[in-house]
Amino acid sequence: MGGILAYGVYVPYNRLERSEIGAALGGPGGRGARAVASYDEDSTSMAVEAARLALRSAGPDTRPQALYVSTTSPPYLDKTNAAAVHAALGLDHGAVAADLNGSVRSAVAALGLALDSSRGPTLVVASDVRTGLAGGADERDGGDGAVALLVGAGEPGLPVLAEPVAATSSTAEFLDRWRTPGDIASRVWEERFGEHAYLPLAEAAFTHALKDAGITADEIDHLLVTGTHSRAARRFVALSGVRREAIAPDLTASIGNAGAAQPGLMLAAALDRAAPGQIVALVTLSDGADVRLFRTTDALTEHVSRHTTSTLAEQIESGRPGLSYTSFLTWRGQLVREPPRRPDPDAPAAPASFRSEAWKLGFTGSRCTACGTRHLPPTRVCVHCRAVDHMVPERLADVPATVATFTVDRLAFSLSPPVVAAVVDFDGGGRFRCELTDVVPESVAIGDRVEMTFRRLFTANGVHNYFWKARPVRATDKTEGTS
């Protein structure tokens, strides 16, 4: 039987304290903090980060046959956003990449399609940048993040960690939350109506799922209830009949509600905590109710013990507090500042981007087979031995590096000045000039260890220019990457 083979989560580095919102707008703001995607991040770049961690956890030889990306904040319409994720991961051209976007429920649907598919390993990624109008509940309680779940039948070396036990859904059409194309914020109907609509749907789906699984509510070991209607979610938890100690925290206090990514993030956190043979119930309230029950396997213990990437709890703990509310609004495009008195950047040219896809999106350099010298970007002529066309491609996205030198540029334009430009030396050879991100300029030093991260450099004429930057190795990572 198929199930979840591996998973990876990504929580952005920055945190906005809710008290900071209150201080700026007047009022209490609320307790806790929300995770904030940086000025150079969006749902596509975060999807890449989560997917890289899932594949690293699965093993270097894992090759997904399909990629589904779900979000309510797609960087592009018409164009397939999953294609950029596919390229950044260096997946085979034969692996299909598709978007399932537009609603929180689309992420749960993507997981269901993958579990029901007979295709080979499928990577399901949910990523969201949640926002709202200034001072509103969505701005305060929303959060940004991404999760990737690798789904498949399992095989030696890549066993199933959690197998599906039951899955039920109930659907109804009602106006709880909606947003028309182009709007920056959702509109929400009065809360009591949403609670009135959601509870019968959730109770019906939950009852059917328990019956199909042949268990009772008190046999559930981990209850995860997600959705953008927090009042209905809390009310369902209270009525579910599940033991109090089995109810999982909804993450709102620590990072906010990450929308389409929230169900997967809570599922990943539960798998980090679960023991073999336990039942995990995932309930998602969005235009109805979706219930999925999983039973963890004996393989989960070994998987968790050899975690090579940071867990959700560790990423929450390692976040950087102190982001100002004005920086948050600037990054969101809701506070427009005077641009630099320099020419605007040019949009990337389509033919050049297409020809250099492996380098630009996959960060694939080359190594000379004559003398072993590594080149970034790839080249035909070796800079060391001058051999021509004696190169093999070499992907460097997961190779750690060391800062050789750097400068802090206070004149270059950035939504988060100053710019820290660095020269980094990769383990095993290769030198590259790039920008550092997720970094405090005053703390940078020669010899710092860094890792590559997929980011959006800028947007020009509606074209998002994606490429790679370096960031300090997160302190909680078990490894710095694999070569």
Image (cartoon, rainbow, N blue to C red):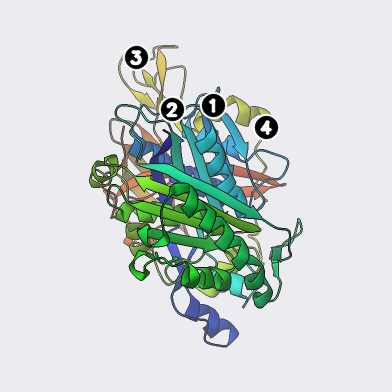
Residue contact at pointers 2 and 1, CB within 8 angstroms: yes
Marks 2 & 3, CB-CB < 8 Å contact = no
Q: Amino acid at mark 4?
A: Ala
Label 4 sits on a secondary structure element that is helix
- Secondary-structure class at tag 1: loop
Give the distance between the C-alpha atoms of the residues marked 4 and 1, in whole angstroms.
22 Å
Q: Which residue is mark 4?
A: 350
Query: Is 457 above or below relative to 227?
Result: above
Residue drawn at x 47%, y 66% as measured from the top left: 240
| Residue 63 circle label | 2
**Residue 13 point in image, percent of width and height:** 42, 59
Earlier along the polypeptide chain: callout 1 or callout 3?
A: 1
* Camera-side residue of 201 and 175: 201
Q: Residue at x 61, y 48 (%)?
A: 106
Report how far apart the C-alphas of labels 2 and 3 lie in the structure.
25 Å
Indicate the secondary structure of the residue bearing disc 3: loop
Label 2 – label 1 distance at C-alpha? 9 Å
Tag in front: 4 or 1: 1
Between 58 and 192, the residue placed more toward the observer is: 192
Look at mark 1 in the image and give the residue it sits on: 95
